[in-house]
Image: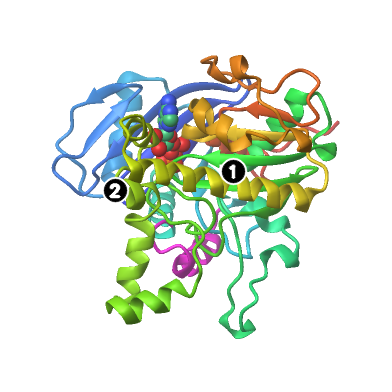
């Protein structure tokens, strides 16, 4: 039983083919710079020569050609799973895509103007290319639809019709479930704080498998300091800079999304570069990392109080999985909360899910590589109408 997972961006299509019987990855690839002459396709690590792709449809057809010429065969694919960033209030679960669902994803574009249009284009193209397969949309926001009103409500005039949605839900779902497995306890009994620290970054408080709070908001701009995004700022900053610097709303929006975060403070959005600058004695980089870590610690305290009892703190994504320094500093001095990091375990390079807290710690500190594609594939085959389970 194979599932093709597609993640369509504005100029790229990332894809994976997974065998769900053995949970094996059979192929991975990326068609990028769609719409440009320099467009290229990397299939299973091999650069496949192309003359570029005019549009997403040409990109996806090139991907199919690569499968046909280089394998593996696509004849056992039972469904296509699509990553969709924003599902609004409407989608709390993955959903089998029909014309109505397509329309609803389109109606959510104002909430995710950078992402949903590309996700939708990918869906339209894939439905044309694979008309006989079921297509499933898996939403980044869906896992956080369990947030209680006190966590998702902004204290602003109700007619604004805005609320917190939260993102990275597929990752938070996968990682929190894996955490329970690693602890050998039922998912429904485990409380976790998940730190998804990549270029984009968010924290989730997960109580017994349900997300109860998360750091991103109406948009993916809120919360932690990110590669290029500011995370939390006083909303009063916006009118202040609009008036004092004469910036337009679009200019402010763009600055908060692209020129802020680590890039804004240190001139670099890649954490490895920022650490290099810190080691070279750059005071701006040092301040950037202090702010980055301070923000993470603030959310850990916040979500510790939200959950009351915490069984595991989990680090995932590019920084969370690979950067012992951030992990160590984020949790330093929290022994009173039952939180400790074993220096040797933390420093040991490893790719697999593991504990980095000392044995017998009150709170397990875990590093768990995220796997959003596997989670999308899993949710795809479990969606009603995709694969009929044989009766017991
Ligand atoms: P995205 O949000 O784009 O999916 P990733 O989860 O791939 O991002 O994370 C990218 C981030 O991970 C980059 O900021 C990069 O610096 C950071 N990163 C990757 N490897 C390391 C490492 N060994 N040490 C510190 N940071 C790392």
Q: Residue 171 in the image: state x and y as whole percent.
A: 58, 40
In percent of the image, x 83 and y 32: which residue is there? 186
Q: Earlier in the sequence, mark 2 or mark 1?
A: 2
Residue behind mark 2:
11
Label 2 residue near ligand 1, CB within 8 Å: no
Could you classify mark 1 by the number of other residues whose Cα lies within 10 Å: few (under 14), some (14-19), or many (20 or more)? Answer: many
Helix, strand or loop under label 1? helix
Label 1 residue near ligand 1, CB within 8 Å: no
Helix, strand or loop under label 2? loop
Could you classify mark 2 by the number of other residues whose Cα lies within 10 Å: few (under 14), some (14-19), or many (20 or more)? Answer: some
In the rendered view of the protein, which quadrant contains the C terminus? Answer: top right
> What residue span does the magenta drawing correspond to?
97-115
Residue behind mark 1:
170
Q: In which image quadrant can residue 259 be found? A: bottom left
Instruction: Please say which color scheme the image uses.
Output: rainbow
Q: Is residue 247 left or right of residue 183?
A: left
């Amino acid at each position: 039983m194979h599932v093709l997972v597609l993640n369509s961006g504005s100029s790229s299509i990332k894809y994976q083919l997974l065998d769900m019987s053995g949970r094996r990855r059979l192929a991975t690839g990326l068609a990028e710079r769609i719409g440009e002459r320099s467009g290229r396709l990397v299939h299973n690590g091999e650069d496949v020569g192309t003359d570029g792709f005019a549009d997403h449809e040409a990109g996806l057809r090139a991907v199919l050609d690569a499968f046909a010429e280089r394998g593996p065969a696509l004849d056992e694919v039972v469904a296509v799973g699509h990553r969709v960033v924003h599902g609004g209030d409407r989608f709390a679960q993955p959903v089998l895509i029909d014309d109505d669902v397509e329309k609803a994803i389109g109606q959510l574009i104002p909430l995710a103007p950078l992402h949903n249009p590309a996700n939708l284009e990918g869906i339209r193209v894939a439905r044309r290319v694979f008309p006989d397969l079921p297509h499933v949309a898996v939403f980044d926001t869906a896992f956080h639809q369990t947030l209680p009103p006190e966590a998702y409500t902004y204290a602003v005039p109700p007619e604004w019709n805005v609320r917190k949605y939260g993102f990275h839900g597929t990752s938070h779902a996968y990682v929190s479930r894996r955490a329970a497995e690693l602890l050998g306890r039922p998912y429904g009994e485990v409380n976790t704080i998940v730190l998804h620290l990549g270029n984009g970054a968010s924290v989730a408080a997960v109580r017994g498998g349900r997300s109860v709070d998360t750091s991103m908001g109406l948009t993916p701009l809120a919360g932690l300091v990110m590669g290029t995004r500011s995370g939390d700022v006083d909303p009063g900053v916006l009118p202040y800079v609009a008036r004092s610097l004469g910036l337009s709303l679009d200019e402010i929006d763009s600055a908060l999304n692209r020129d802020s975060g680590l890039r804004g403070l240190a001139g670099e959005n890649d954490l490895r570069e920022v650490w290099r600058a810190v080691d070279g004695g750059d005071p701006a980089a040092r301040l950037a990392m202090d702010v980055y870590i301070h923000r993470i610690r603030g959310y850990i305290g916040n979500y510790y109080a939200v959950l009351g009892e915490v069984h595991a703190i989990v680090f995932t994504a590019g920084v969370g999985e690979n950067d012992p320094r951030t992990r160590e500093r984020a949790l330093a001095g929290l022994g009173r909360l039952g939180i400790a990091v074993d220096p040797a375990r933390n420093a040991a390079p490893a790719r697999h899910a593991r504990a980095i807290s000392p044995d017998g710690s009150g709170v397990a500190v875990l590093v768990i590589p995220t796997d959003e594609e596997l989670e999308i594939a899993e949710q795809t085959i479990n969606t009603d109408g995709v694969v009929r389970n044989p009766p017991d």
